[in-house]
Amino acid sequence: MAVQFLDMRMSEHIAVATEDGVELNNGSALFIGDLGIQTLAAVGTPNQGDVRIWLSGTVTVLRPGGVQTPPPDVKLFITRNGDGTLSSGTLIYNMTFNSGTEILTVSPISITACDFPSASLVAAGQIRYTLFITSASPPGTGDLFLIGPVAFNGIACAGSN
């Protein structure tokens, strides 16, 4: 069967860079992206077992000037069909990014992942994908901030030709 375009979604957590960011620390994982990818058009077709999901995102973090502690790692996670908490759902992607050793660093981080959900997941008509960010930094140290922009995108298609 020919390739079907199913859906395209975007989740925007922070539209533009902000001066006062949100502190990233190992005390919590911030929920920064949420997509409900629609798969209903493939349900009941020969393409139901051939759905592919493409996910991409951009986050920007700031390591403020004057911070003397070792550079903290940033961790990004994408889960499937969770309830909005990191421990729920199926982890389909994780990445560790070192924020660098410079005194003042602004780091835009881009991620790309894909998922090949089973026919039974596709049959539900929608698959939820969530994006989380955290850091190895101790809470309250001000080592690292999420300043934006932050966006999470997803596209679903089906078929094998």
Image (spheres, rainbow, N blue to C red):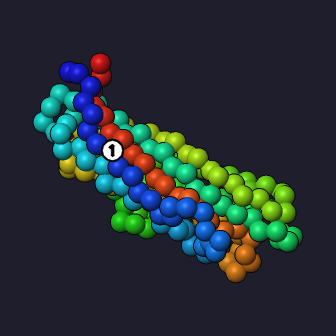
Identity of the residue drawn at 33% across and 44% down = 8
**Residue 111 as seen in the image, left or right of residue 48:** right
Identity of the residue drawn at 68% across and 78% down = 139
Residue 133, placed above or below residue 90: below
Along the line of sight, the residue nearer the viewer: 149 or 38: 149
* x, y percent for residue 75: 61, 57
Identity of the residue drawn at 84% across and 57% down = 101
Which corner quadrant holds the C terminus? top left
User: Badge 1 is on which residue?
Assistant: 8
Q: Which amino acid type is shown beneath numbered disc 1?
A: Met
Residue 81, placed above or below residue 38: below
* x, y percent for residue 46: 17, 28
Which corner quadrant holds the N terminus? top left
- Which quadrant of the structure image shows residue 44? top left
Identity of the residue drawn at 30% across and 49% down = 37
Outermost residue, top side: 161
* x, y percent for residue 91: 46, 53
**Residue 76 as seen in the image, left or right of residue 53:** right
